[in-house]
Image: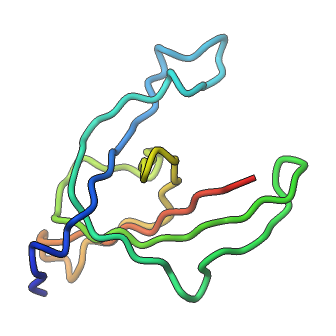
Amino acid sequence: MVVNPGKFNKVVKLQRLNNSKKNRGFAGEESWETIKTFRCCIETEESKSIRTAYKYGAVVNLDYKIITTRYFEDIRHEDRIIINNKPFEIEIINNVEEANVQLRIWVKGCRV
């Protein structure tokens, strides 16, 4: 699968939770540290796009996106991705065609 490199026009951050920075066992924003900054293409998943759900005692809108980027190994499901200063949870990590060329990452963010 060949992709025009000009398509990767967005810059996002990959963050990982640092357990040593937890405050009394709870993870706050200061507990996350940036592992990698990378270029990617961001698409909206049309089948889910934005869904409304009841979460944490409030009605929230779940925002689903698909990120396509060059392959790299240092990514885990526990990490999160920051897009435009908004955190997104990683749902699926797909090594496209198992060729170690591209990653497709499905992410979910929530807006209260």
Which part of the image, by quadrant, shows the N terminus? bottom left
Residue 38 spot, x, y in % from top left: 22, 51
Nearest the camera: 65 or 104? 65
> Where is 31 relative to 73, above or below?
above
Visual colour scheme:
rainbow
Quarter where residue 68 is shown? bottom left
Residue 85 spot, x, y in % from top left: 46, 44
> Where is 25 relative to 110, above or below?
above
Quarter where residue 63 is shown? bottom right
Residue 103 spot, x, y in % from top left: 25, 69
> Residue at horizontal 68%, vertical 55%?
111
> Residue at horizontal 66%, vertical 22%?
26
Q: How many marks?
A: 0
**Relative side of 95 to 60, left or right:** left
> Residue at horizontal 59%, vertical 79%?
49
> Where is 49 relative to 53, above or below?
below
Nearest the camera: 79 or 65? 65
Direction right: furthest residue: 57
**Relative side of 93 to 38, left or right:** right
Residue 107 spot, x, y in % from top left: 49, 63
> Residue at horizontal 38%, vertical 39%?
15
Direction top: furthest residue: 24
**Relative side of 107 to 96, left or right:** right
